[in-house]
Image (tube, rainbow, N blue to C red):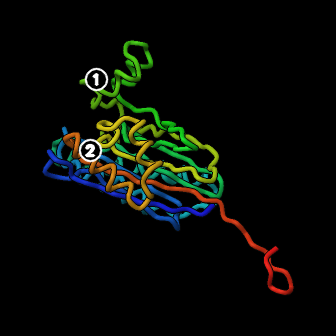
Amino acid sequence: MRLEWHAATDVGAVRKINEDRYFASEPLGLWAVADGMGGMARGDWASTQAVEAVGGVARQTSLEAMLHEAAGALRRANDAILAESHAQGTRMGTTAVVLVVRDNQFGVCWVGDSRAYLLRGRQMHKLTRDHSQVQEMVDHGIITPEQMERHPSRNVLTRAVGVQPDLAVDSIVDRLEPEDVVLLCSDGLHGVLDEREIRDILLRVPLSQVGQALIARCHEEGAPDNVTLVAVAAEEVTLIQFGEAGSAQ
């Protein structure tokens, strides 16, 4: 597969500090989004620790090994943030979602409510399950998935990097098909625009302009939070063989 990617971040219309961070490296086959927790101190510092830890991993050939390295990086960031929290006498934390691509496979690992979506054909699939209070309410049948997106407690997390020792990191692995687009984003995007509108923009707008288009729509809706996204698109590479006379076969 040949990969193209585009990333964008914006402070939004209300927040004074952008506490989101992203990392992107095609040579590593690794992309990440982290969202510092605004209700705690130094969310920007915490999210920076997460993406720097992920960006510092060594490239592994296999998808599973690279996902293992990414999860280990998040756990190291967790330890660093906890240590700083104790030293400062305060609490800080961040969400994180990481994408790894190897050939015709991809994997995602995550903590918190930053999400990964897969656009395949004209269908949008949510790949991650939020570590949040409202997700647990959905799991127990208390509210519907539709109600979850606008619930007043939707920002209450049950898991984040830097909040508790022994961090659990969830992960999934799936195949990668030609024309797939994997989107990583903070809740400043998916908390403002629904999946249908995000899908429509991904289908309509060139990849290089997706960030601008999605952020502009968030601003039209008030952009109450920082907005960050990374979109990675896959294309099948066509190999052309030439005959002795130089004509394509």
Residue at mark 1:
151
Q: Check disc 1 and report its element: helix, strand or loop.
A: loop
Q: Measuring from the top left, give residue 86's x and y in whole percent.
A: 22, 44
Q: Measuring from the top left, give residue 21's x and y in whole percent.
A: 31, 55
Going by the image, does 114 lie left or right of 88? right
Q: Check disc 2 and report its element: helix, strand or loop.
A: helix
State the quadrant of the N terminus.
bottom right
Going by the image, does 87 lie left or right of 245? left
Which circle's residue, 1 or 2, is located before the other in the chain?
1
Is residue 98 visible from the viewing direction of this image? yes
Q: Residues within 10 Å of mark 2 (few under 14, many from 20)?
A: many
The answer to whether marks 1 and 2 mark residues whose Cβ atoms lie closer than 8 Å is no
Q: Measuring from the top left, give residue 144's x and y in whole percent.
A: 40, 18
> Viewer-proximal residue, 29 or 198?
198
Q: Amino acid at mark 2?
A: Cys
State the quadrant of the C terminus.
bottom right
Q: Is residue 152 above or below residue 31?
A: above
Q: Residue at x 27, y 31 (%)?
A: 155
Q: Residue at x 36, y 56 (%)?
A: 22
Q: Is residue 134 above or below residue 42?
A: above
Is residue 85 visible from the viewing direction of this image? no
> Viewer-proximal residue, 3 or 213?
213
Which of labels 1 and 2 is toward the front? 2
Q: Amino acid at mark 1?
A: His
View extreme (right): residue = 244
Cα distance, mark 1 to mark 2? 18 Å
> Viewer-proximal residue, 242 or 159?
242
Where residue 153 sits, quadrant-wise, is top left
Residue at mark 2:
218
View extreme (top): residue = 142
Q: Is residue 58 above or below residue 41?
A: below
